[in-house]
């Protein structure tokens, strides 16, 4: 599940769970909840909006709800549920690409698999340096990645070596290394500092008062292959009153 | 407007204006003038030719002539003129890709939007470290980028993070940062030093006595997506008298 709040011009989407050590995994209702929150932010967007996505505690998100998949009771049933979640999550990444405002992932803890994917769907990632890792666990779990996951990583992770280390080597990447690999914008020594820095960055971006539609189209034009995989169009837009 | 001179084997294309603080913006006549100059250099090319493009004063170029667009008197008229300039400038980038000699942009001052695009159309960029920025202003102005601008930046700016910072964040990039981002070859402390270093590099490249046709085809083969967008063919060429 998640909540959506507004702090001035900045929307804050918080992944929520039932306890302090909740892995904030994405099952069908959590995915619905996230999709609604993003849609709400989009509907209420104005020039000068920004979005932060965050959570609290040990985990940002540990990925899709594999326990729900396994609760199907059979291997075929589990695979069907897994595929269902993978396809439900696709529009989340698409919605993030289309969101007409700058976005910041304030990664408070571990972000693995779909959790890492959600973080990377943001324009900027800020994480902790003292705790928590970014981790694509798929090869360890024994499952290939959905096409749009791979497309996202190919779009956002510039170095071929880094992509190999993230996806094929399933490296558990701490803050300092994430900085070096260009995965994170900044890394801090506590959850509070991550939150503060994310809000500072979001407000800075919001203060540029960019026209949201133009911003979203320029964002998508940075990642045309990903947009192709997600079925997103990229349009020319002029939002200047004199032009 | 611009002039084309020859210094030994090196062509020097200078963007000119009417005053010391001329922004050297590209209106229809400037674009024509630049296209003619590049065509002339191409017609007179020999093995051992090279081209430097430069300007003087505070600006290399601040981009397309938006004032000319706005002088249309209506928003529709302004957009028509903007589109006209965007389409007229496309052959300039194509001609730079096709030019059968090494090219160096000696960036004496600010290079923004189409000005930055022109600089990046060169094989090497040398800029000042003490003054001047590289800046893609489109998101600040509220207009998406022409397809060939985006294709050029995707071709030449290697890091996904750098592309995001240049195009989506509209960073104003000074010399030292441009070096770190791999946007420029070198950065110096004055316009004179930039000019000297550019001439040194151009003469060094000219001294390799490359067969121009081969050079141009190899250049294009580095940027196949850009060539696709520009409608440029890439051919196999052998220019060796023994092969």
Image (tube, coloured by chain):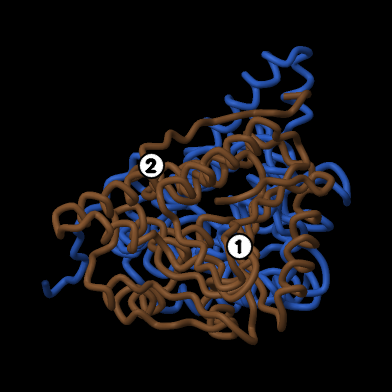
Chain colours: A brown, B blue
Q: Residue furthest left?
A: B243
Pick the quarter of the image with the C terminus of chain B. bottom left
What residue would you read off at disc 1? B105
Mark 2 surroundings: few (<14), some (14-19) or many (≥20) residues within 10 A: some
Pick the quarter of the image with the N terminus of chain B. top right
How far from the left and from the top, in percent, is residue A34? 54, 46
Identify which residue is drawn at 70% across, 59% down. B134
Which is closer to the viewer, label 1 or label 2? 2
User: Looking at the picture, does residue A177 appear above or below residue B231?
Assistant: below
Res. B3 in view: yes
Mark 1 surroundings: few (<14), some (14-19) or many (≥20) residues within 10 A: many
User: Looking at the picture, does residue A39 appear above or below residue A133?
Assistant: above
Label count reads 2
How far from the left and from the top, in percent, is residue B62? 74, 47
Identify which residue is drawn at 29% across, 63% down. B214
Res. B181 in view: no
Q: Secondary structure at mark 2?
A: helix
What residue would you read off at disc 2? B229
């Amino acid at each position: 599940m998640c909540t959506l709040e507004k702090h001035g011009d900045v929307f804050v989407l918080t992944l929520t769970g039932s306890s302090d050590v909740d892995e904030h995994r994405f099952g069908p209702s959590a995915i619905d909840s996230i999709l609604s929150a993003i849609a709400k932010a989009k509907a209420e967007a104005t020039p000068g909006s920004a979005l932060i996505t965050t959570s609290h505690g040990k985990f940002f998100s540990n990925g899709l709800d594999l326990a729900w998949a396994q609760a199907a009771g059979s291997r075929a049933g589990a695979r069907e549920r897994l595929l269902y979640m993978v396809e439900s999550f696709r529009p989340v990444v698409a919605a993030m690409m289309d969101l007409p405002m700058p976005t910041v992932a304030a990664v408070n803890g571990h972000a693995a698999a779909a959790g890492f994917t959600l973080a990377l769907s943001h324009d900027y990632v800020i994480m902790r340096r003292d705790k928590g890792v970014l981790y694509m666990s798929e090869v360890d779990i024994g499952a290939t990645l959905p096409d749009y996951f791979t497309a996202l990583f190919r779009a956002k992770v510039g170095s071929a070596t880094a992509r190999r280390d993230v996806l094929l080597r399933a490296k558990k990447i701490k803050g300092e290394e994430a900085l070096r690999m260009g995965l994170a914008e900044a890394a801090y020594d506590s959850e509070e500092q991550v939150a503060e820095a994310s809000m500072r960055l979001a407000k800075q971006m919001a203060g540029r008062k960019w026209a949201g539609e133009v911003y979203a189209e320029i964002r998508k034009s940075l990642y045309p292959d990903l947009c192709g995989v997600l079925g997103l169009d990229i349009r020319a837009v002029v939002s200047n009153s004199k032009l």
